[in-house]
Image: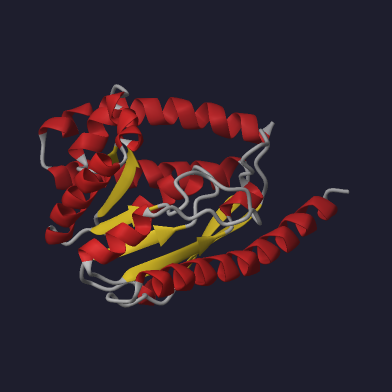
Amino acid sequence: MRSLIFKIGFYIGSALILVIGSPLLFGKRSWAMAGLALHGKFVLWWLELTVGTKIEVRGLKNLPDNPVLIAAKHQAPWETFALPTILKDPALIMKEELMAIPFYGWFSRKFKMIPIRRERAAIALKEMLREAETRKQDNREIIIFPEGTRQVPGAEPNYKPGVIKLYESLNIPCVPVALNSGVFWPRNEKKLYKGTIIIEFLPPIPPGLERKIFKETLINTIEEKCNELQKEGEDEKESHLNSKI
């Protein structure tokens, strides 16, 4: 029931924020980004109020002030709402077809997110790199989910070449991000669970590493920490479930 209440409130609240905030489409981008952060805070607040799912952020000291590539694990919709509330001026790499959705797509263009057309392969990659370079010049955090889609906690890593291309092209530090959102917001379940979703920003990987070394470092760093956070989350989740028995 709590999960259902959250989802109903989420859709109603999100729709209201989009409609009421539509004048921001004609203002400064910074105003629209403030609206994005507000929406993220609403989702996190509503999730805690209805389901009891809290947020804990670790490793903020690892975020540099200069432009940075954020390579984040993707397990649930949660991180797409949480990251804009944590970072200063994020630019998310997202599927180009999402840009066509009314309001959502319009705002994504206003935010100057980075679209990628997966079906166009090499051309899409060049366009993505060009857009990312522009966002770098604007001193923004560039977010990519290296596996391209949500993964179940503990699933075999499937990192795509895009993150490597970005790392090589942008020549800026890459901050790996681990989390355990999939424990409390499971991909293949309708129910959400009470607990603390942890997101951790790990030490930056310096620019200039060889491709193979960077890929191995990125995967090992994220996956090892995700396994730790998954265990921490599952223990808390089990404790809450046992307390109801």
Q: Is residue 173 above or below residue 17?
A: below
Residue 73 in percent (x, y) is at 49, 56
Point 46% across, 73% down: residue: 217
Residue 196 in percent (x, y) is at 60, 58
Q: Quick one: 158 or 7, which is closer to the camera? A: 158
Residue 148 in percent (x, y) is at 44, 46
Q: Residue furthest top?
A: 102
For this view, does 239 lie left or right of residue 144? right
Which coloring applies here? secondary structure
Q: Residue furthest right?
A: 245
Residue 228, located in which quarter of the rendered image?
A: bottom right
Residue 153 in percent (x, y) is at 64, 53
Q: Is residue 45 visible?
A: no
Residue 69, located in which quarter of the rendered image?
A: bottom left
Q: Quick one: 147 or 138, which is closer to the camera? A: 147
Q: Is residue 213 above or below residue 106?
A: below
Residue 118, located in which quarter of the rendered image?
A: top left
Question: Across the whole image, how many numbered discs are drawn on residues?
Answer: 0
For this view, does 127 lie left or right of residue 230? left
Q: Is residue 34 visible?
A: yes
Q: Is residue 35 above or below residue 220?
A: above
Point 33% across, 76% down: residue: 209
On-image quarter of the N terminus: top right
For this view, does 136 lie left or right of residue 160? left
Point 11% across, 42% down: residue: 28
Q: Quick one: 215 or 100, which is closer to the camera? A: 215
Q: Quick one: 189 or 196, which is closer to the camera? A: 189
